[in-house]
C-alpha cells in the first residue's frame, strides 16, 4: 500500500481516511467530488489528482463508499 519512498500524507489509505472524515462531517454523508478535491488541496497544499483518484479507488474497492454522479456516498 505504501512504499518506503512515498510520503505518508500522500498515500492512498491516508487520503482515504481524510475523505471519510469529510464525509462523516457532511450533513447527509455525501459530498460532491469537486468539494472533496478542493478540501484535500486546501488541507494538504500540493497534491496530485492521481493520488486522489487512487485514494477514491481504494475506498471503492474496500466497499466503504459508493459513487452516484456527482456525489460520493458513505455506505
Image (cartoon, rainbow, N blue to C red):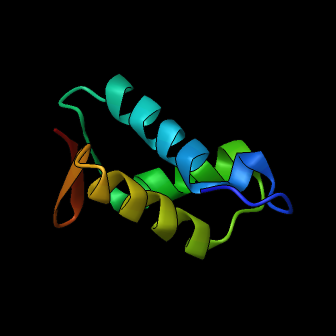
Q: Tell me the residue at 68%/42% (across/down).
A: 43
Image check: 32 left or right of 43?
left
- Report the residue that reaches farthest toward the bottom: 50
The spot of residue 12 in percent (x, y) is 56, 55
Question: Is residue 51 shown above or below 62?
Answer: below
The tally of labels here is 0
Image quarter hosting the N terminus: bottom right
- Report the residue that reaches farthest toward the right: 5
The spot of residue 18 in percent (x, y) is 53, 38
The spot of residue 46 in percent (x, y) is 77, 61
The spot of residue 59 in percent (x, y) is 36, 52
Q: Tell me the residue at 28%/57% (across/down).
A: 60
Image quarter hosting the C terminus: top left
Instruction: Place residue 11 in its image quadrant.
Output: bottom right
- Nearest the viewer among 27 and 54 is 54
- Nearest the viewer among 14 and 70 is 14
Image check: 30 left or right of 56?
left
Image check: 42 left or right of 71?
right
Q: Tell me the residue at 75%/47% (across/down).
A: 8
Amino acid at each position: 500500500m505504501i512504499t518506503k519512498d512515498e510520503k505518508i500524507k500522500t498515500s492512498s489509505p491516508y487520503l482515504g481516511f481524510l475523505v471519510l472524515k469529510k464525509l462523516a462531517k457532511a450533513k447527509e454523508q455525501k459530498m460532491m467530488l469537486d468539494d472533496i478535491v478542493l478540501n484535500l488541496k486546501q488541507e494538504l497544499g500540493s497534491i496530485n489528482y492521481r493520488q486522489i483518484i487512487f485514494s477514491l479507488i481504494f475506498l471503492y474497492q474496500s466497499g466503504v463508499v459508493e459513487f452516484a454522479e456527482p456525489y460520493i456516498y458513505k455506505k
